[in-house]
Image (cartoon, grey):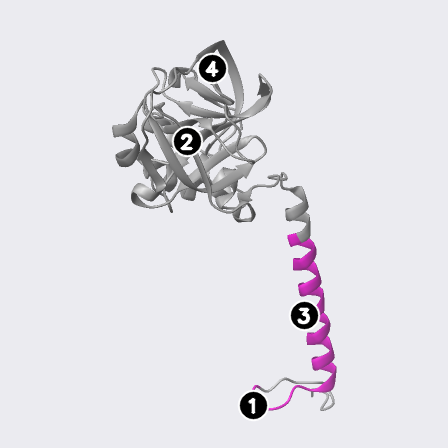
Amino acid sequence: MSDKNTPFFVGYLAAPGALRRFLIAICVVFIAGFSALGLTLGVAQDDPGPGAFRFDYGRQTVTGVIELTPYPLVRVTKGNDRIKPGTTLMLSGQGKSSVDKRAIPLDGKLAKVSGVILQRGDLNMLQLRGGARGISEVEGASPPQQTEPLGRWKLAGEICDGKCLAGAMRPGRGLAHKACANLCLLGGVPPVFVSTQAVDGSEFLLITGPDGEALPKSAYDNVGQFISVDGEVERRGDLLVFRMDPETLEVLE
């Protein structure tokens, strides 16, 4: 016969003292174990670095020349205390949207742009305000803008969307970010290549197709993956543009 003193759990009765102590010990072990696992996984991740909406800067308004790469940029000609002339800002709308409809008619023209800066390192993006308050043509001749070819490069790194990478989300890069990044890219947000090797002093390059067209849809499958790819690099102000050759793309991981 079984020992009548052996603890036995009955769902509608209070747990016996010995079983209660055992369950508490198991819970403590599980909580501590999962906490340690979470800490280990977090420490093992690459540090995405500082990047954020710079609301502390306040609304920024500058004047410059609108360029299409085909993604809209503004080459700043008249800046302010934070954004100096010669700065090149990628442009985006609110959420996962582009500003193509507003920017395309102003290609090559002088315009005033206004919005909130997103910034990670030397990567800068301006999220425009709505309508004409965000972007509008101004009077005056558009000064010529130079594009400096930097030759052909073979780079290793990741394709990301420029907005989340710049600070709209954390971490803003890697496979955990892939689905969100693809939604941004489908919405027309400028894509950025994060290179493991600095190119002319920068690890962030706006990435396009080989002839300066939009990033090929075939490359979307490799967003957030560690890849190598060849292409031509050019400098536009303080921003580098990488015209990738999709035929050379290779997954490295």
What is the x, y in percent for residue 69? Answer: 36, 23
User: Of the numbered discs in the image, which one, if any, rests on residue 12?
Assistant: 1
Foreground: disc 4 or disc 2: 2
Mark 3: few/some/many CA within 10 Å (<14, 14-19, 20+):
few
Q: Dot 2 corresponds to which residue?
A: 63
Residue located farthest toward the front when viewing the structure as drawn: 140
**Residue 79 placed where, x, y %?**
49, 31
| Three-letter code for the amino acid on which mark 3 is drawn | Cys
Name the side, left or right, on which 103 lies relative to 193. Answer: left
Q: Which mark is residue 233?
A: 4
Q: For the residue marked with disc 1, what is the amino acid?
A: Tyr
| Disc on the earlier residue, 4 or 1 | 1
Q: Amino acid at mark 2?
A: Thr
Q: Amino acid at mark 4?
A: Val
Which SS class for mark 2? strand
**Residue with the mark numbered 3:** 27
Q: Earlier in the sequence, mark 3 or mark 2?
A: 3
Identity of the residue drawn at 34% across and 43% down: 133
Name the element at disc 4. Answer: strand
**Residue 39: x percent and y percent?**
68, 52
Kindly indicate the quadrant of the structure image that contains residue 219.
Answer: top left
Q: How far apart are the alpha carbons under marks 4 and 1?
A: 72 Å
Q: How dense is the environment of label 1, judged by Cα within 10 Å: few (below 14), some, or many (20 and up)? A: few
